[in-house]
Amino acid sequence: MGIPRIKSYDVPTVVDFARAPHSWRVEPARVALLIHDMQNYFLKPYESAAFTGALVAQIHAIRRACKLRDVPVFYTAQPGGQSKAERGLLLDFWGPGMPEDGEARSIVRGLEPSPGDHMIVKHRYSAFKQSELLEMLKRLGRGQLIICGVYAHIGCQATALDAFMAGVQPFVAADALADFSLEHHRMALTQIASCSGKVSTTAELLEQLGGAS
């Protein structure tokens, strides 16, 4: 029960799966960015500061490119100190979750939200569950969503699948995600690429956003 300690690994950027990848490309006028669960609580299990620092740097580069093109930026953040009823079945798999502590709940240093960014309170694996994310994307005229953050095979994958089923094209930045292990990370990328989204690299997304770095 609970989140394990996580060792660093070489983040994969290539996905092997049965069919050819589709040709979706990010369109700055249609896309939004989702920075998923980059809270201190979820980064603390990583044993390597260099590993998490590289993750933050990749996400920061994508966020900067989005800001330069007026692309809306969303964050998910889970609440602390949840009751058993609020926690639901997550309690059985992961325990009580994060404490009611500002430091644990805060977005990791280097990715703090800016004025005008959108905060989504996260209740379940998918950022779309029990939230206004889909309605907000529709109001903003955004039919594409870049997803980065942690953990790839849990919330990021669930969010990509829900986006797809809601008619929103999900893009995941393979090297701007992190997971429990290389195996979990590869599994998530393969599943997303096979049935719900486009797996790209940070460099590819930056090029499609207009060449920012």
Image: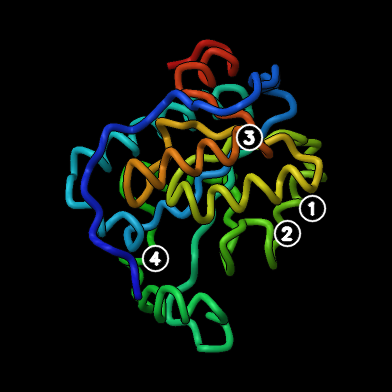
- How far is disc 1 from disc 2 in space, using C-alphas? 5 Å
Badge 1: residue crowd in 10 Å (few <14, some 14–19, many ≥20): few
Badge 4: residue crowd in 10 Å (few <14, some 14–19, many ≥20): many
Residue behind mark 4: 105
- In this view, 145 is above or below 5: above
Residue behind mark 3: 194
Mark 3 touches mark 1? (CB < 8 Å): no
Secondary structure at badge 4 equals helix
Q: Residue at x 34, y 37 (%)?
A: 55
3 or 2: tag closer to the N-terminus: 2
Mark 1 touches mark 2? (CB < 8 Å): yes
Q: Amino acid at mark 2?
A: Glu
- How far is disc 3 from disc 2 in space, using C-alphas? 27 Å
> From this viewpoint, which residue is outermost toward the front?
18
3 or 1: tag closer to the N-terminus: 1
Q: Position of residue 24 (x, y in %)?
A: 70, 21
Secondary structure at badge 2 equals loop
Q: Nearer the viewer, mark 4 or mark 3?
A: 3
Q: Amino acid at mark 1?
A: Glu
- How far is disc 3 from disc 1 in space, using C-alphas? 26 Å
- How far is disc 4 from disc 3 in space, using C-alphas? 33 Å
The C terminus sits in image quarter:
top left
Residue behind mark 1: 135
The answer to whether residue 137 is left or right of residue 126 is right
Q: Residue at x 64, y 21 (%)?
A: 21
- How far is disc 4 from disc 1 in space, using C-alphas? 25 Å
Q: Residue at x 49, y 27 (%)?
A: 15
Residue behind mark 2: 132
Q: Residue at x 59, y 18 (%)?
A: 209
Secondary structure at badge 1 equals helix
- In this view, 1 is above or below 105: below
